Image (cartoon, helix red, strand yellow):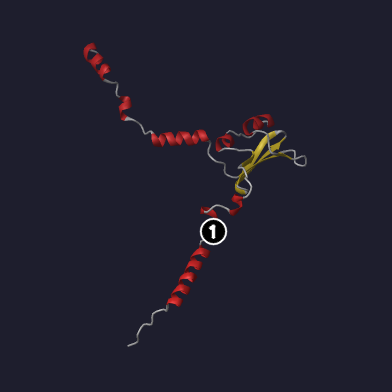
Amino acid sequence: MQRIKFLSPARKITVFWVAAWVLAVSGCSAVSTYLPNIQQFGAYKPDINQGNFLTEDMINRLKEGQTRQQVRAILGTPLLDDAFHPDRWDYIYSYTKNGREIESRKFVVFFEKDLLSKWEGDKMPVSEVELNRIAAARALPNDPSANDRGFFAWLFDLFSGDE
């Protein structure tokens, strides 16, 4: 029968460091997610919201045939109003945190004869009003006691004789 040979202490230390190195390298993508960026320790970089912040309810208000003034009232002034493409407005939004771009969206509106003909772009976030409505519906379910008229209404009905 063959006897199992155990690792020497020096070999155990080597295996430990190799295993630690493999775990550390395999988690490199998680390092930037969970640990602070080393560049953060330099100069302060403020969060930057740049461009037109459009929401889903703003896009839902667009209808074909609207004038340029109506579209501008709904979406705001376009970030890019190109002289070479006068019938195209570009709405671009980007959010940068600590010098890294976190979010970027593009939305384009097309006109024919100064009337809105089509639009296309990235999916826009739900508006804060809609998010608040959804949160309230989840947090405050329908209260069955809301239909209860109360003790005094019951007492009034008892003595009024109306059936």
For the point 55% across and 41% down, the residue is 125
Classify 147 as above or below 81.
above
Near-viewer residue (59 or 42): 42
Classify 141 as above or below 95.
above
Residue 137's x, y, as percent? Answer: 41, 34
Disc 1 marks a residue whose amino acid type is: Ser
Hey, which residue is sitting farthest top in the picture?
A: 160
Near-viewer residue (68 or 96): 96
For the point 55% across and 52% down, the residue is 36
Q: Secondary structure at mark 1?
A: helix
Residue carrying label 1: 29
The answer to whether residue 6 of the structure is visible from this angle is: yes
For the point 46% across and 73% down, the residue is 13
The answer to whether residue 163 of the structure is visible from this angle is: no
Query: How dense is the environment of label 1, judged by Cα within 10 Å: few (below 14), some, or many (20 and up)?
Result: few
The answer to whether 115 appears left or right of 13 in the picture is right
